[in-house]
Image (cartoon, rainbow, N blue to C red):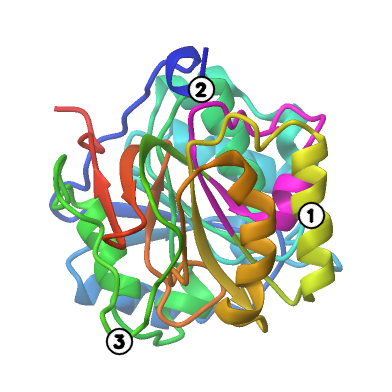
Amino acid sequence: MNCAETVQPCLPAALPHNACFAIIAPAGPARLDTHKASQWFADRGYRCRIYPSALQAQGYLAGTDQQRLQDLHDAFADPAIDAILCMRGGYGSMRLLDQLDFQLIRRNPKPLIGYSDITALHTAIYRQTGLITFHGGMLNADLLGGKLQPTEASLLAQLGGQVRAGEPIMHPADFALSSVLPGVASGPLLGGNLSMLGATLGTIAELDTQGCILFIEDVNEPLYRVDRLLTQLRLGGKLEGVKGVLVGDFAGITTAALTPLLEDTFAPLGVPVLAGWRSGHCDPNVCLPLGARVRLDSGQQSLVLEQDLFRA
């Protein structure tokens, strides 16, 4: 039995007109220009509500665990909030996992957007609720940071329900992809930051990879550490049931340098591997719907949605 069969899907609603975004910081702190943030949303026909954690700092955390957890719960519970956007990653999401109210989240399904450290929330929430979440641009570095398209466009198109079943998730043509291992596979797209996938093994956020298309990305990790992380997943039995692999950006490592390791790791499994996908700590940063069923065709270098992302 695979993850597609064991997790009951939980679909959020697409963004309505004049949608309201909750701005939270479940991990690390960052300075936020509240006027600039509010104007960014207003210019696009949206509103935002900035929660206390987005304005606080306690060392390397955006406020206390209790405050960051409360903001996350409050954002899911508030019927006036349509989507939840993380301000940044850093570190801290893991500290909240054993206190998350998964029943609250499943009762109030909403798009949760972020990447990097937010991977811990993506994997835990999907495993416990089946909710589709979004590995996409965050407020500070991505949306207010002026990253190249389709960083913003891919995020808003997916959240708005404009990418439907049977349609491709578009990748910018200016950035080359690499068909490391050809083939075609379908399954729920799961994963995120490779370091976080390793760190959450043995926790309630441990990724169930059976039958999935595995997505991985990372930043500031030399090649030998990427090797160690992939070996950790292999030894932990997390690669045996993978149907295909989508390799995002590994900042500081070229696809050419990464390819021999990918071949060594995944060729024995006989699964397709497509590398060079611009998602992660990169510019542009293409949004990916985690938990959604997709079709990966490495030879054709395409990723196609096989389901709608939102409830009717």
Residue 183, percent from left and from top: 37, 48
The location of residue 22, given as percent across then percent down, is 43, 53
Q: Mark on residue 283?
A: none
Q: Position of residue 35 (x, y in %)?
A: 41, 80
Q: Badge 3: few (under 14), some or many (20 or more) residues near its Cα, within 10 Å?
A: few
Q: Position of residue 147 (x, y in %)?
A: 40, 84
Q: Quadrant of the C terminus?
A: top left
Residue 82 left/right relative to 27: left
What's the magenta region? 191-216
Q: Is residue 99 visible?
A: yes
- State how far apart marks 1 and 3 are (Cα): 29 Å
Q: Which label belongs to residue 229?
A: 1
What mark, if any, has residue 3 been given in the picture?
2
Q: Circle 1: is it few (<14), some (14-19), or many (20+) Cα within 10 Å?
A: some
Cα distance in 3D space between marks 1 and 2:
22 Å
Q: Nearer the viewer, residue 258 or 260?
A: 260
The amino acid pointed to by label 1 is: Leu
212 sits to left or right of 223: left
Give the residue number, with chain letter if any, for mark 3: 174
The answer to whether the residue labelled 1 contacts the one labelled 3, judged by CB atoms less than 8 Å apart, is: no
Picture quadrant of residue 204: top right
Which circle's residue, 1 or 2, is located before the other in the chain? 2
Task: Compare marks 1 and 3 and give the one earlier in the sequence.
Answer: 3
Q: In the rendered structure, are the residues bearing label 1 and label 2 in contact, judged by CB atoms less than 8 Å apart?
A: no
**Three-letter amino acid code at the position of disc 2:** Cys
Callout 1: helix, strand or loop? helix
Q: Nearer the viewer, residue 228 or 78?
A: 228
